[in-house]
Amino acid sequence: MPQQILIIGLGQFGMALARTLTEKGAEVLAVDRRKALVDEASAFVTQVVLVDATDEGELARLEPARRDACICAIGDDSKEASIICTALLRQMGAPWVIGRANNAMHRRILLLVGAHLVVNPEEEFGQRFASRLINRHIIADMPLGEDLHITELTVQPSLVGKSLIELALPKRFGVMVVAIRRGSPSRVFQPNPESPLQADDRLIVVSNEEAITKLTQGA
């Protein structure tokens, strides 16, 4: 059964989230008080509603308790509205409430009023992009926890032709290769530790951020 997702706020972040979740098979109910954004989202989401989500009565009609996740994606235009909306979602029994924060204080308040998770898309993107600027071999990076990342990076010339056994990356750098992406069109497979790496390979690794820097600078 598809996940039922409620997204409140169709700014740049909310709209992108609604589109991507829909493409991944979720049933998205999108909400905004701006008609132009509601009309835009109506082209691809399951359902869209023109409403002010800080109105308790209107929000209750959206039945947040029946949704698998409720995302309050209200942006910079109104921190007060995002706080009210987040608090109301929890009060109405939403099982998983995700808030969008613009700064550290906003994040603390959203957590205090009951958000299960708070994200700051601009801050998170900035951190990931900074890592990519410093480590040019990084193609993609996703945090998994406190200081654990899954990272996709190109194979440096010094690694080509060598096997994972020879390279001993876990011992030397604290990096665990969990998959390799190869070819065009690309395919992803579990690595054979005895097979040599190829020049066009991309390594998918799990490690902390410091280990990636050591690998890209010291390999």
Image (cartoon, rainbow, N blue to C red):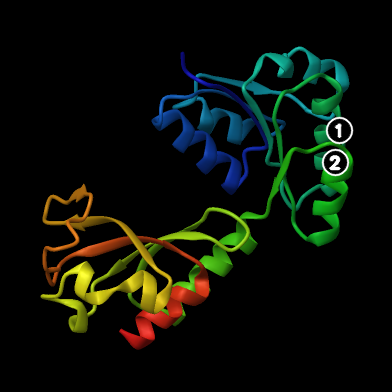
Q: Disc 1 residue type?
A: Ala
Q: Secondary structure at mark 2?
A: helix
Q: What residue does disc 2 label?
A: 83
Q: Is residue 41 above or below residue 141?
A: above
Does 39 sit left or right of 136 as displayed? Answer: right
Label 2, residues with CA under 10 Å away: few <14, some 14-19, many ≥20: many
Q: Are marks 2 and 1 in contact (CB under 8 Å)?
A: yes
Task: State the image coordinates of residue 140 (x, y, percent, origin top left).
Answer: 39, 61
Task: State the image coordinates of residue 135 (x, y, percent, origin top left).
Answer: 41, 79
Does 7 sit left or right of 45 as displayed? Answer: right
The residue positioned 37% from the left and 69% from the top of the image is 170
Does 13 sit left or right of 71 as displayed? Answer: left
The Cα atoms of the two marked residues, 2 and 1, are separated by 6 Å
The residue positioned 48% from the left and 33% from the top of the image is 21
Q: Secondary structure at mark 1?
A: helix
Q: What residue does disc 1 label?
A: 87
Label 1, residues with CA under 10 Å away: few <14, some 14-19, many ≥20: many
Task: State the image coordinates of residue 26 (x, y, percent, origin top left).
Answer: 48, 24
Please state, as top left, top right, bottom left or bottom right, where the C terminus lies in the image.
bottom left
* Numbered circles on residues, count: 2
Which image quadrant for residue 22? top left
Residue extending farthest bottom: 218
